Amino acid sequence: MRLSGATVLLTGGSSGIGAATARMLAAAGARILLAGRNAARLQAVAAETGGIALVADLAVPDGPAKLAEAAIRAAAWDCGGCEAAAAGNGIDILINNAGVGWAGPLTEMSAATVAQVIAVNLTAPIELTRLLTPTLGAGGRGRVVFISSIAGTTGVTHEAVYAATKAGLGCFAESLWYELAGTDVGVSVVVPGAVDTPFFARRGHPYGRTRPVPVSAQRVARAVLIAIERDQAMTFVPRWFGFPAWLHGAAPGTFRALAARFG
Ligand SMILES: NC(=O)c1ccc[n+]([C@@H]2O[C@H](COP(=O)([O-])OP(=O)(O)OC[C@H]3O[C@@H](n4cnc5c(N)ncnc54)[C@H](OP(=O)(O)O)[C@@H]3O)[C@@H](O)[C@H]2O)c1
């Protein structure tokens, strides 16, 4: 799929992986609709990338629907002669990137925080995809991208709810991949390990391991662009994370023994 001239709705565009992805998409000639809560940070990334900022809270019940409406309006209104106009003034690519973490023993997690993590990481991507898939890539190719996590593939101690949301997202995407096979809309899942972004500071629990060393947000952004351009169904960042994911599926007992031994 060509990125030049494509219109992209990118959630979580105000920080970390999202901001890095926005910069790379802009350099590739895409037109970006950036979503996030923090208006000032969102405007700064929008100004830098020539994108349109859409302030939206994905944790509230009508947040995803309001964002979908605003994005459809923005894509139709400000096409300015771009190639997307010829393709139908619509959104071509939806990147479900916004996410929040929480770490600690499950019994110390409040019900409100459980609801927030599920709403942002799982309900919002499902809702945005449900609402926008019929409009994606009108007249051309469309794509939905999900930013998952290695936590959702293997499980991680003290991140049970976060891991569950990412596992749910992966299974949702896999099912959608089957459902949309043979249509003009493709599905990609990008599975990062640890990434050097404000994510850990925001969840109030720093990244405490020495290994694996967190990769840069730019590296994940590059993987997102490649997944779109090459129609990749699933990609791990770094690529070697595909091995623990495979081992967990193929030999869960061995994986658990190794995880207990090495952390
Ligand atoms: N960093 C890692 O190690 C890592 C590893 C694997 C997967 N991931 C995943 O990568 C994605 C991006 O994370 P990141 O590392 O770039 O973290 P980040 O720098 O904290 O960015 C998170 C983004 O999500 C947005 N967001 C959070 N809550 C929101 C809400 N209620 N409504 C709307 N937007 C909301 C934030 O926007 P505002 O601040 O403007 O609200 C921000 O733009 C997440 O899905 C995360 O789970 C991260």
Image: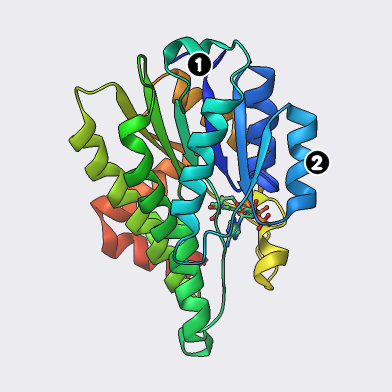
Residue sitting at x 19%, y 36%: 178
Q: Mark 1 highlights which residue?
A: 84
Please state, as top left, top right, bottom left or bottom right, where the N terminus lies in the image.
Answer: top left
Is residue 88 visible in this depiction of the protein? yes
Which quarter is ligand 1 in?
bottom right
Question: Disc 1 marks which amino acid?
Answer: Ala
Secondary structure under badge 1? Answer: helix
Q: Nearer the viewer, residue 195 or 136?
A: 136
Task: Give me the disc on residue 52.
Answer: none
Rendered view: 41 above or below 10: below
Residue lying furthest bottom in this view? Answer: 107
Secondary element at image label 2 = helix
Q: How is the image coloured?
A: rainbow
Circles 2 and 1: CB atoms closer than 8 Å: no
Structural crowding at the residue carrying mark 1, measured as other residues with C-alpha within 10 Å and reported as few (<14), some (14–19) or many (≥20): many
Tell me: 94 left or right of 176.
right
Quadrant for residue 88, please give it. Answer: top left
Mark 1 near ligand 1 (CB under 8 Å)?
A: no
Q: Please name the residue shown 37% across and 18% down the image.
A: 141
Question: In the rendering, at what x and y percent does residue 22 appear?
Answer: 65, 33
- Circle 2 residue: 44
Residue 210 rendering spot, x and y as whole percentages: 68, 59
Q: Earlier in the sequence, mark 2 or mark 1?
A: 2
Residue 113: percent from the left, percent from the top? 53, 78
Q: Is residue 158 above or below residue 191?
A: below
| Mark 2 vs mark 1: in front | 1
Q: 9 above or below 197?
A: above
> For this rendering, which residue is in front, 214 or 1?
1
Residue visible at 75% across and 38% down in the picture: 45
